[in-house]
Amino acid sequence: MKVLYVASEAQPFMASGGLGDVAGSLPQALRKRLIGCRVVMPLYDTIRQELKDTMTFITSISVPVAWRRQYCGIFQAKYKGVIYYLIDNQYYFKRDTIYGHFDDAERFTFFSRAVLEILPHIDFKPDIIHCNDWQSALTPVFYSTMYSQDPWYQGIKTVFTIHNIQYQGTYGMDLVSDVVGLKDENANILEYDGDVNFMKGAIECADKVTTVSPSYANEILDPWYSHGLDSILRERQWKLQGILNGIDTESYDPETDEAIAMKYNSQNVAQGKKKNKAQLQENMGLPIREDVPVIGIVSRLVSHKGLDLIKAVFDELLSTTDVQVVVLGSGDWQYENYFRELADRYHDKIGVRIGFEPALARKIYAGADIFLMPSKSEPCGLSQMVALRYGTVPIVRETGGLKDSITDSGDGAGNGFTFKTYNAHDMLGAIHRALGAYWNKEYWPTLVNRAVNCDFSWGRSANEYIKMYKQLLK
């Protein structure tokens, strides 16, 4: 079986979020299971030079973008056994940032069409083309309307994965003829609520639509989560499936992690956590105390991450409870300022670092006792799985991938603490239950060991994708 994995970003070349991590890890896991998986992505100018030096030029072609044709250079690189194809066009991709430009619609229309145009030139005809998010959503549309009847292209199946339904690629209807280049009779494929909607087109045309957790697949059928796409998803529910993401267990491994104070594994987790906790407290300017529970937060500081709940009750928590909190993140000014003010008032209880420092994030995973993730919505979430890997017990709201990966330990078998409704005092109740467990010195080591032995490797997820691919090809 041959799979072409299409993404606007992929590790190690470019990653701005979860998509880049998935596109770097899942193809490797598929390849280890004897699936011929290759990746195609744009050749951004901001890719590190040492990675560019590993690329070889294959050929150049021209790619139609509606009424014009654009240069497309095809480069190839290999990383950890996976072949990557990088699409070169300096007009579209020689930018300081990868997203957020006035012509993003045209840039990723070009990329989506180039994915199909390069196939005869790279000696690789896939059985499955697996696209991700709105930036490659037009590939299934182009395949369905322009390529599927071509003898060379016949028989290919398309999969489209929604990583975050909030970002859909929505533009004015004039794009249909001027940028996308669809015939008038096919314009309705992209039209939704009077606009062009790239994601809606992929949901219409792909043979399978997946999300990054089973619960998120159910949630996006509800208007509260769907950002307007629930009606089309309910119509196409027969092709919708959720598969939980994994994490890169080689990168996130407390036994080999160079960023932490002491490496450890499941055999000496208590000793490792103790040493890393002291280093974390020192780094964050907090009193070094072995006996106090430390709650870690590593997050984008935006509303849907549940920060309104934190704002509502953290004064109460910090003023009445012997606890320390460490926060790492950046985002909306109101939340950044809130945490700064909180740190001024409770300087011996909360340490805050505004920004994102990957090494510090790892120190928090290793040094905190508890990890708080009270998201309003969370398609999958990786931080809760990383926290478990480091023996840090998560507190999460039951939504999306958080619900699918964390079960409440109140039943004596769970791996964390959960709360259901989006309510600040329900979250506070879950925090107090976690703190009660922490102070139970007989029970807490059992819970930490249960956490550190959870398996959220990509192997489990890859097997689910392979099963889905095989069903499609039947």
Image (spheres, helix red, strand yellow):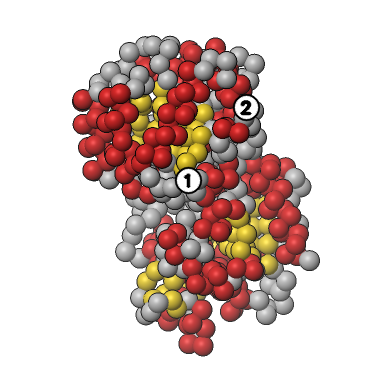
433 lies above or below 136? above
**Is 324 displayed left or right of 470 in the figure?**
left
Contact between marks 2 and 1 (CB within 8 A): the answer is: no
Which circle, 2 or 1, is nearer the viewer?
1
Quadrant occupied by the N terminus: bottom right
Quadrant occupied by the C terminus: bottom right
Q: Position of residue 406 (x, y in %)?
A: 56, 39
Is residue 320 shown to the viewer in this render? yes
Q: How many marks?
A: 2
- Tag 2: amino acid: Arg
**Is 184 displayed left or right of 96 in the figure?**
right
Q: Secondary structure at mark 1?
A: loop
Is residue 351 shown to the viewer in this render? no
Q: Position of residue 341 (x, y in %)?
A: 21, 31
Image point 54% across, 45% down: which residue? 403
Which residue is under mark 1? 420
Mark 1 crowdedness (10 Å alpha carbons): few <14, some 14-19, many ≥20: some
- Tag 1: amino acid: Lys
**Is 3 displayed left or right of 304 in the figure?**
right
Image point 65% across, 35% down: which residue? 455
Which residue is under mark 2? 450
Image point 52% across, 50% down: which residue? 400
Measure the C-alpha gap from mark 2 to mark 1: 22 Å
Examine the image and state in which quarter residue 470 appears.
bottom right
450 lies above or below 40? above
Mark 2 crowdedness (10 Å alpha carbons): few <14, some 14-19, many ≥20: some
* Mark with earlier residue (2, 1): 1
* Of residues 118 and 343, the one drawn nearer to the viewer in this rendering: 343
